[in-house]
Amino acid sequence: MKDVSANADAKRLAGEAAAELVKSGMVVGLGTGSTVAWTIKRLGERIKEEGLEILGVPTSFQAENLAITSGIKLTTLNSHPILDLAIDGADQVDSSLYVIKGGGAAHTREKVVACSARKFVIVADESKYVEKLTWPVPVEVLPFAARLVERRLTDLGGKPVLRLGKMKDGPVITDNGNFVMDVNFGAIVDPAALAAKISQIPGVVEHGIFDNLDDLYLARASGVEIIGRR
């Protein structure tokens, strides 16, 4: 039986270890998820304990609320278009450091923040680390183009499913006013090629395959492993 408390402790260690990358004067992208939440909380502690001075750009409502609660001053990409660092969570990471994100339907904003940063770091527990990506790929779609996108994703070998709300009737609507399709491609042998093909479909706003990860802070039961791009 899996030791839940040990896994939670490992997540905390990974999240807090990534927080040590942040130095005073930095502008930092703040991601979403249970592991990166420890990063945000630790940054709040460092602000109180060390007088750390940073600005944060949150990727979601959840991250924004936690950052405010933790005492982190916030800014926007309009004010600070180039970030020093972005730290985020993941749904799945493969051995070549390709990432699937978007379980919270925020992957478009998460990708914009990640690509605006000089360095992009993911914090995740070891259950998210796999040899090949198999997680369904979230795809943000213009509602007007939903049927076309669905057909084209099927032509690529995917099985698209429109993401529905849990506490409301109808589809999930992103912060950008769009639909999300979760697309099962099975084992993804070539993430870069698949990402390029999805991006070419008219009506696709953004997909959840990330190819710009620099370092993975991986929470294992034995401690934190830092895996850099080869």
Image (tube, helix red, strand yellow):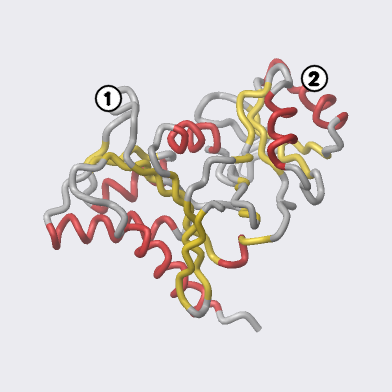
Amino acid found under the numbered disc labelled 2: Leu
Residue 43 relative to residue 228: left or right: left
Q: Is residue 168 above or below residue 132?
A: above
Graded by Cα atoms within 10 Å as few (under 14), some (14 to 19) or many (20 or more), the crowding at tag 1 reads: few
Q: Is residue 15 left or right of residue 218?
A: left
Residue 110, horizontal then vertical, whole percent: 49, 38
Residue 34 in the image: state x and y as whole percent. Answer: 47, 59
Q: Give me the C-alpha separation between circle 2 and circle 1.
A: 36 Å
Residue at the image point whose x is 24% and y is 42% from the top: 26
Judged from this view, the residue extending furthest toward the bottom is 1
Secondary structure under badge 2?
helix
What residue do we see at 51% from left, 64% from top? 218
In depth, the one of 163 and 140 nearer the eye is 140
Q: Which one is earlier in the sequence, the residue at label 2 or at label 1?
A: 1
- Residue topped by disc 1: 79
Is residue 170 visible to us here? Answer: no
**At which x and y percent is residue 170?**
68, 33
Question: Looking at the image, is mark 2 or mark 1 nearer the viewer?
Answer: 1
For the N terminus, give its image quadrant: bottom right
Q: Is label 1 in a helix, a strand or a loop?
A: loop
**Quadrant hosting residue 148:** top right
Residue ID at (47%, 31%): 112
- How many marks overall? 2
Image-based side of 96 in relation to 59, left or right: right
Residue in the picture at 27% in, 56% down: 43
- Residue receiving disc 2: 148
The reply to whether residue 110 is in sight is: yes
Q: Position of residue 39 (x, y in %)?
A: 36, 57
Residue 165 horizontal side relative to residue 80, left or right: right
Amino acid, disc 1: Ser
Using the rendered view, name the quadrant where residue 165 is placed.
top right
